[in-house]
């Protein structure tokens, strides 16, 4: 099938670092989704941004690169 998703658990495993702090270690997005083309919501709260720019980094493994399709950011009240 053209355009079919490949992979599975242990294919896209990466760390998520926000504002210099590693908040999630070895996040397996395929395992979290459980199926292809399935949304995964990972709330990250109480992040202090002191320089006016939110910095998020994804450090992957040698198997496959980190993959995200969107990020939604809300200001704290």
Image (cartoon, rainbow, N blue to C red):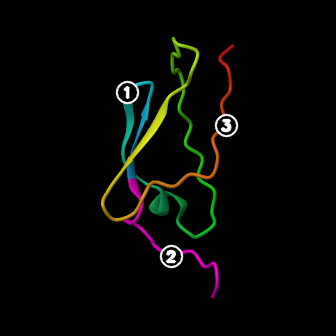
Residue 20 placement (x, y as % from top left): 38, 26
Q: Main secondary structure of the magenta part?
A: loop
The quarter in which the C terminus is drawn is top right
Rounded to the nearest angstrom, the CA distance separating label 3 from label 1 is: 19 Å
Q: Around disc 1, counting alpha carbons within 10 Å, would you say few (fewer than 14), some (14 to 19), or many (20 or more)?
A: few
Q: Around disc 3, counting alpha carbons within 10 Å, would you say few (fewer than 14), some (14 to 19), or many (20 or more)?
A: few
Chain part drawn in magenta: 1-13
* Residue at horizontal 55 percent and vertical 43 percent from the top: 42
Residue 38 placement (x, y as % from top left): 63, 63
User: In screen coordinates, is 25 left or right of 73?
Assistant: left
Return the mark for residue 72: 3
* Residue at horizontal 58 percent and vertical 70 percent from the top: 36
Q: Are the two marked residues, 1 and 2, in contact with CB atoms closer than 8 angstroms? A: no
Label 1 vs 2, first from the N-terminus: 2
Q: Nearer the viewer, residue 54 or 29?
A: 54
Label 3 vs 1, first from the N-terminus: 1
Say what secondary structure mark 2 lies in: loop
User: In screen coordinates, is 19 left or right of 5?
Assistant: left
Q: Quadrant of residue 45?
A: top right
| Residue marked by disc 2 | 6
Say what secondary structure mark 3 lies in: loop
Looking at the image, is 11 positioned above or below residue 74?
Answer: below
Rounded to the nearest angstrom, the CA distance separating label 1 from label 2 is: 31 Å
Label 3 vs 2, first from the N-terminus: 2
Residue 70 placement (x, y as % from top left): 64, 46
| Residue marked by disc 1 | 21
The quarter in which the N terminus is drawn is bottom right
């Amino acid at each position: 099938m053209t355009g079919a998703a490949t992979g599975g658990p242990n294919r896209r495993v990466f760390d998520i670092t926000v504002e210099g702090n590693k908040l999630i270690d070895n996040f397996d997005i395929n395992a979290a989704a459980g199926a292809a083309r399935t949304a995964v919501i990972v709330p990250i709260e109480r992040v202090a941004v002191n320089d006016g720019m939110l910095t998020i980094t994804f450090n992957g493994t040698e198997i496959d690169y980190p993959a995200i399709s969107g990020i939604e950011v809300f200001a704290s009240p």
